């Protein structure tokens, strides 16, 4: 069973950048599909981006709202999945969560559905404000 911890959130001005990390323990993240979600105040959790587990086919997922601004990547030496965010705007404010789904889990699922992921971190706050 994997445990996830997010870090890297903070306060940033519009147009700025942040790098979030999702660190795993208990298992290697290589065996998991990993996604990043955002929950803005008063809104539902929204799937932003995702990266497939090693040994599985598929392109990375990016929600239209973050395409060209956010980049997801794996750092296997640190057992982390990172989210590089740039050109941040006010709508990017929220709590950011990483989530993992075992590659061995069968059934239909979606990067956009929180219910598709069994393991979650505690979240890290990102505030974009001038």
Image: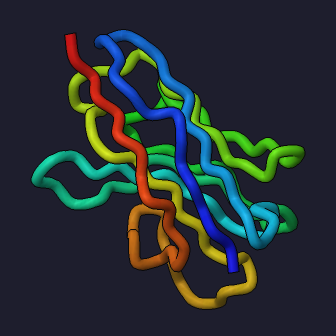
Question: 112 or 73: which is nearer to us?
Answer: 73
Residue 130 is situated, as x and y percent measured from the top left of the image, at 20, 9
Q: Residue at x 29, y 12 (%)?
A: 14
Q: Residue at x 82, y 45 (%)?
A: 78
Rendered view: 41 above or below 58: above
By what rule are the colours in the image chosen? rainbow
Residue 113 is situated, as x and y percent measured from the top left of the image, at 39, 69
Q: In which image quadrant can residue 2 be found?
A: bottom right
Rendered view: 14 above or below 9: above
Q: Can residue 68 be seen in this view?
A: no
Question: 92 or 119: which is nearer to us?
Answer: 119
Residue 124 is situated, as x and y percent measured from the top left of the image, at 41, 45
Q: Residue at x 80, y 42 (%)?
A: 75
Quadrant where the image shows the N terminus: bottom right
Q: Which residue is drawn at 75% across and 62% down?
A: 29
Q: In which image quadrant can residue 47 be found?
A: bottom left
């Amino acid at each position: 069973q994997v445990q996830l911890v997010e870090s890297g959130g903070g306060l940033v001005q519009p147009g700025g950048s942040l790098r979030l990390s999702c660190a795993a323990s208990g298992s290697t993240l290589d065996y998991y599909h990993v996604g990043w979600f955002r929950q803005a105040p008063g809104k539902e959790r929204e799937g932003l981006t995702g990266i497939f587990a090693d040994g599985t086919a598929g392109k990375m997922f990016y929600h239209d709202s973050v395409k060209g601004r956010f980049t997801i990547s794996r750092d296997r030496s640190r057992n982390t999945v990172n989210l590089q965010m740039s050109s941040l705007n006010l709508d990017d404010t929220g709590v950011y969560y990483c989530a993992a789904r075992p590659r061995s889990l069968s059934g239909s699922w979606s990067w956009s559905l929180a219910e598709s992921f069994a393991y979650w971190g505690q979240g890290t706050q990102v505030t974009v404000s001038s």
